[in-house]
Image: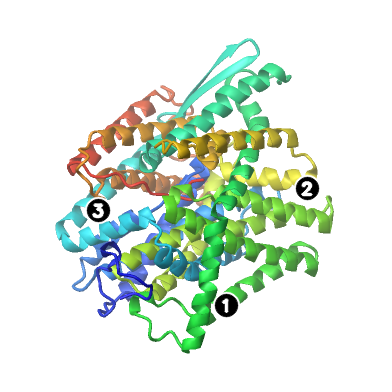
Amino acid sequence: MREHDGPAEPVDAPLVPASVSLPEITPKAVLLSILLAAVLAGANAYLGLFAGMTVSASIPAAVVSMAVLRLFRQSNILENNIVQTAASSGEALAAGVIFTIPGLVLIGYWTSFDYWQTFTVSLVGGVLGVLFTIPLRRALIIHARLRFPEGVATAEVLKIGASSGGNAGRRVRLLLGASALGGGLKFAEGGLKLWSESLEGALELGRVTFYGGLNLSPALVAVGYIIGLNTALVVFLGGAIGWLVLLPLYQAFVEAPADVTGVAAAKLIWSGQIRYIGIGAMLVGGVWTLIQVRGPILHSLRQLVLLYAARRDEGTGSALLRTERDAGVVWLIGLTAASLIPMVVLYRHLLDQNIIAGAGLTLLMVVTAFLFSAVAGYMAGLVGSSSNPVSGVTIATIMLAALLLLGILGREHPAGPAAALLVGAVVCCAAAMGGDNLQDLKTGHLVGATPWKQQVMQIIGVATGAVVIVPVLSLLQAKYGIGAATAAQPHPLSAPQATLMANLAKGVFGGSLPWHLVGIGMVLGVGIIAVDQRQARRQAQLRFPVLAVALGMYLPLKLSAAIMFGGLLAEYVRRGRPDSETSTDDQGLLCAAGLVTGEAMVGILLALPIALSSVWPSLAGDPFQLFADPPLGGWPGLVALSFVGLLLVRAAQAKGHAEHVHSTQSGI
């Protein structure tokens, strides 16, 4: 059944044999794929700008696909798999875009999102991510036999759906109900302004401030539930180090601003100083990730050379089984070359027709995109998408691009930071796609899908995400603002990664990067790696991945606290299950995914009146708002959040002790 040597393992035997050919790419599957990819791309864009983390939508997309396709007389598991493949590609692309592209607005290069440039960069990055995973599929899934836990979990959900028709409808009802709840609570807070978005306070002891806060977003609690206690705890630990240790130390030993106190003082020092320590730790994390995976990636590349040499000697790949047919080498090389042309033109235009700088940036972009797609794919296969090191590798790319441009253009060139960010954007999209695509290809490998058909649908999902992402970003910018707070937009989407990338690119060119703080973060990152390696030698369950800790230092503490609450709920549910019960049918996971999607969709819809205010001036401002200031502050939101936590626990327990499936995407 397969080309590799040795007996086939039962766990790898596809559900649909290679000798059986079922419809996969059908008109109804394509239409449903485009719709889900658009919705999930918008939802992940909102969540990533808000929380600095995104979640995988493979399982919810599979559940929705099963329910919708059952309405037709003919449907099958491979058709369902095609839909979830394309849908998850759309949401993965959103993760790559929102971690970088908003930085162009934050540095002042754009005043609003440029549609065609953003579309081009996101499409090229996403397509490269798909193309680079074509050769990596055989290397990492077939030969290396990596676990790809989220891919295995999605395959199990598809198998359950194929064997039990009644469950699909029940799961969709739960998903839609949770979406309605998440959306309703977001409308009450963000539209009607019935309560504030967070509870915050500060304790001042002399010149030192100890800050505490909790964001009241159900989506953040859902994210914490999805990623589980271990990851949530590590992110919160990073936040505690940044806000409760480094910030008071800075106030104690460095002269702090005298005109602000309390919560305002804590936020000012954290955003202006402590965040750069997080940058240093993330930079170390990206380099450490490369060091960790250098051996497996080089081995995979050697296998690819041998594989394609053997195919060339055999003449064609027509003898391959259906379940082993990837897109051809001609398509791989041709589309890769075609993808580079618009980037050469864009870089050359940005850099005053400097063809040397444009070609150099394009070469750096394609090499790092392939390398980091492989890194992301390998890490996703080893321990899951929650360890996809997107932030770390993007920081490394932007640093390399900025230093290259600094040498070619000098410090004064106005487009230097923007060009470095655009290189990082392509690489970030490719890396985000790398881990997600290989998870989907693992799912296809287990259910018996045709790889080249999955790869076609991945490109369709990427194209859909690239089309819708700019309108979503523009709506969110108009309604909430991105980055720093203003009088008109006091509670903007913090866009942690995009702010980090913008500060890094601007700091390298402007000479304003506080290298002493970055250096402290690098030393701290080395220490975290040492602790994590000690935990690994002890085979401890709790690990301290440096990128997750660094992300916590870079997130507002109130966000980390809400994520931690969700992680505690997940652990409570896990401890209440008998060890003998193992199933991927986790109703809590679907409930959490619904909460995220519902809040994100309503958050985007609340921005529509602003977009339409030029036609109907009466829609300007907040047309749904009941109170100028919430009369009870954030306390009603705390009650609502407690109810959400109870609902998550009850949903998880409803099926009778199901195994929790961690399923984050591009989280760090």
Which residue occupies the extreme top position in the image? 206
User: Residue at left 34%, top 79%?
Assistant: 322
Inter-mark Cα distance, 2 to 1: 35 Å
Color theme of the render: rainbow
Amino acid type for the residue under numbered disc 1: Ile
The earlier-in-sequence mark between 2 and 3 is 3
Residue receiving disc 2? 509
Q: Amino acid at mark 2?
A: Phe
Q: Dividing the picture into quarters, in which one does residue 269 lie?
A: top right
406 is higher (above) or lower (below) than 568: below
Callout 2: helix, strand or loop?
helix
Front position among marks 2 and 3: 2
In the displayed structure, 259 sits above or below 140; it is above
Label 3 secondary element: helix
The spot of residue 319 in percent (x, y) is 38, 85
Residue at point 61% right, 37% down? 526
Residue 93 picture location, percent across and down: 50, 58
The reply to whether callout 3 and callout 1 are in contact (CB within 8 Å) is no
- Which residue has dot 1 on it? 333
Is residue 111 visible in this depiction of the protein?
Answer: no
Mark 2 or 1, nearer chain start: 1
| Mark 1 residue element | helix
Query: Image quadrant of residue 452?
Result: bottom left
Write down the residue under mark 3.
Answer: 172
Q: Is residue 56 left or right of residue 112?
A: left
Q: Nearer the viewer, mark 2 or mark 1?
A: 1
Q: Nearer the viewer, residue 230 or 44?
A: 230
The residue at the point 61 percent across, 53 percent down is 101
